[in-house]
Structures are given as C-alpha cells and as structure tokens.
Amino acid sequence: MSKIPPLHVAYLCIGSNIGNCELHLQNAIKEIKKWPRTKVVKISKILETEPCGPVRNQDNFLNQMVKIKSFLNPLSIIDLIEITENKMGRDRVDVPKKGPRIIDIDLIIFDDFKIVSKRLTLPHPAIDSRAYISKLMEDIDG
C-alpha cells in the first residue's frame, strides 16, 4: 500500500514593476492554479511598495501574497516558480539582480521548514526586513 504524502501549507509573494503589473499578478495566479497537486486557497489584496535593494532607478512594485496547499516539496515548488517566471517572460540576463521585473515569485514560508542551502532559504531571508510581507500575510490570515 502506498503512503499518501503530506499536505503542506506555503506562502508565495508575487510582485511586478514592469508594464501592466496588475495583469501580471493575475496571470501569475492563473499559472500557479495550474501547478500539479497544488491548490490556491487564499489571495491577499495588492500593495504598492518601493523597490528593495541596490537598484533604485525603477518603478514601485505591486505585491500580493498567495497561500497554497500542496503535496509537493519545497524544491519542486521552486522549480515551478522558475518555470512560471520564465513562461511569463522574466528576464534574468539583461536585468541587474533586484532590478525591474515583469514577475517575481518568492517562496516565503513552507510549513515550519527551516532550510539554508544554495538554492533555497526558508523562511525567506527577507521575511523580517520587508514590512509589506507581514502586511500581506496578515491580510490572508487576519
């Protein structure tokens, strides 16, 4: 008899500051809803935020939090994030790190996992330094 994998709860922060940002957020959520063995359970309001990091000459971001439940592991979620960002036209070559982005999807929390690796840190390292993350999570979980 096969064992049923555990159902995980995760939070994704999505952001955009190029073009029609609201549409990019909507499209990202549509793509996330297509992920296998994953269900979007709640979506926060949209917040406008100033860019974080060294690249200041860019537009403000629109950010939104998405709460999901998934049977997938964290690295599988990271794979799907990269696939989704690439599908939506995320440019990682000609744009400086933390520069303007058509879409950015970050895995913020995955259950109560604590991971530090080259590819993934959980909880997300910016969780305490970016006030908008807690505002968006509060909007979801009250």
Image: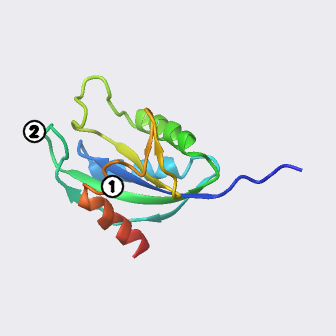
Say if mark 2 contacts mark 1, CB within 8 Å. Answer: no
Residue 127 x %, y %: 33, 55
Q: Secondary structure at mark 1?
A: loop
Residue at the outermost bottom position: 142
Viewer-side residue, 46 vs 114: 114
The quadrant holding residue 63 is: bottom left
Q: Is residue 47 visible?
A: no
Viewer-side residue, 77 vs 129: 129
Q: Please give the name of the residue rendered at 39% of the width and 76% of the height, measured from the top-left corner.
A: 142
Kind of residue indicated by mark 1: Ile
Above or below, 7 against 97 in this view is below
Kind of residue indicated by mark 2: Asn
Q: Mark 1: give few (<14), some (14-19) or many (20+) Cα within 10 Å.
A: some
User: Rounded to the nearest whole Å, what is the CA distance between mark 2 and mark 1?
Assistant: 23 Å
| Residue underneath mark 1 | 127
Residue 61 x %, y %: 22, 50
Q: Please give the name of the residue rendered at 52% of the width and 36% of the height, measured from the top-left corner.
A: 79
Q: Is residue 105 visible?
A: yes
First in sequence, mark 2 or 1: give its number: 2
Q: Is residue 73 left or right of residue 95?
A: right
Q: Mark 2: give few (<14), some (14-19) or many (20+) Cα within 10 Å.
A: few
Viewer-side residue, 44 vs 112: 112
Q: Please give the name of the residue rendered at 21% of the width and 58% of the height, measured from the top-left corner.
A: 48
Q: Secondary structure at mark 2?
A: loop
Viewer-side residue, 84 vs 116: 116
Residue 9 x %, y %: 55, 59
Residue at the outermost right position: 1
Q: Is residue 101 left or right of residue 138?
A: left
| Residue underneath mark 2 | 57
Q: Which mark is residue 105?
A: none
